[in-house]
Image: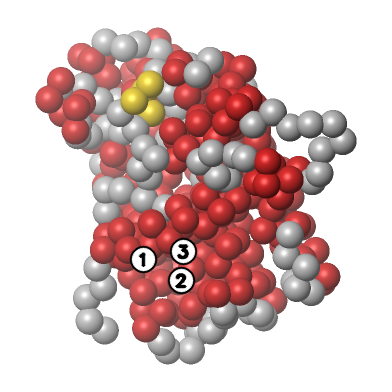
Amino acid sequence: MSKIDIRALLTEKAPLIDKIIEKYVPKKYNEDSLIFSCGKPRYAFNTEAPNKALSDPVWDMLSRGGKRWRPTLFLLIVEALNGDIDKVGDFVIIPEVVHNGTLMIDDIEDDSKIRRGKPCTHIKYGIDIAVNAGNFMYYVPLLPLMRNAKLPAEKSVKVYETYLQEMINIGFGQGMDIAWHRGIANADAVTEEEYLQMCAYKTGTLARMSAKIAAILADGSEEQIEAIGKLAETVGIAFQIQDDILNLIPSGVSKTKGCCGEDITEGKRTLMVIHTLREGGEDGKRLVEIINMHTENQSLRDEAIGIMKKNNSIEYSKEFARTLVQDAWNDVDKLLEPSEAKDKLCAFARFLIEGDI
């Protein structure tokens, strides 16, 4: 298998994905696009208000970047199952738009100020606009499903059920994470298995949604749908672990300022924290003490990071993520025929846990 450039693949797919999103969420609504989205009005549409309150903040968020890896995963799975991209490609909008909607809401919940180098949506447009736009982004991606009369009813129902179950799951995952880092549930007693379940619901769910919908639309067998969904969920978990690791490493602007470890300030229980608490003895007690301070003092955050490094918790987490993905890939490997798309899918899964995206 020749080396596959996943960064180039992501760059290649991004314009196609954005073009599909714009088909259903135009950068400027007019009467025709409002009729397409909402049906004919009983009274009269005002086009200015939806543009100011929905289209502008939605596209402000989407245009800030992001690698579009969830919809790219969707496309690779359809291809690997010999599905027809031309017939089902519009469904890539679902995981990507929902994901960006969750970011808007997350930023309000976390009282964040910056997202992808710019003021968060609620800072720039107001909390009311951000909450409404974020919620809008949970539902507007269903338009391809609602407007696709050619999709068989049984398949349509499967897609709906998959979407609804994953949206329920993401609420549970976010709720667990909030309860732990706010200290309203006993975070110090959280086990590795419980942390992984939170990740499966919070970060794994949109990847799993993307993968399972792709497999359903590409006429995958039940065994393929479940195995591919599990792989995507696992990649999502591993991606969360990787993201938590990167939070402890200065990069970009934070590197020049010598600051990192915002998760420590938020009090988040990551795999590294849980591992240190289990293995670190007195180190674990000191780590909890710092985390519970919710401090922005960089010296204290550096001390916490040093404790995790001392207990090999970062290396443990890296290897844990690699093993998770490898085991999940082994289950998928035997269910897919050899193909270039299969090779890309394998390389893609590995890249997401090794590359800084």
Q: Which residue is mark 3?
A: 73
Q: Which residue is mark 1?
A: 348
Is the C-beta separation of discs 1 and 3 under 8 Å? Answer: yes
The amino acid type found where label 1 is placed reads Phe
Answer yes or no: is residue 45 visible: yes
Q: Which residue is mark 2?
A: 76
| Sequence-earlier tag: 1 or 3 | 3
Q: Where residue 57 sits: x, y (%)?
A: 50, 30
- Colour mode of the rendering: secondary structure
Determine the secondary structure under disc 1. Answer: helix
Alpha carbon of mark 3 to alpha carbon of mark 2: how far?
5 Å
Is the C-beta separation of discs 3 and 2 under 8 Å? Answer: yes
- The front one of 5 and 283 is 5
Is the C-beta separation of discs 2 and 1 under 8 Å? Answer: yes
Determine the secondary structure under disc 3. Answer: helix
- The front one of 58 and 266 is 58
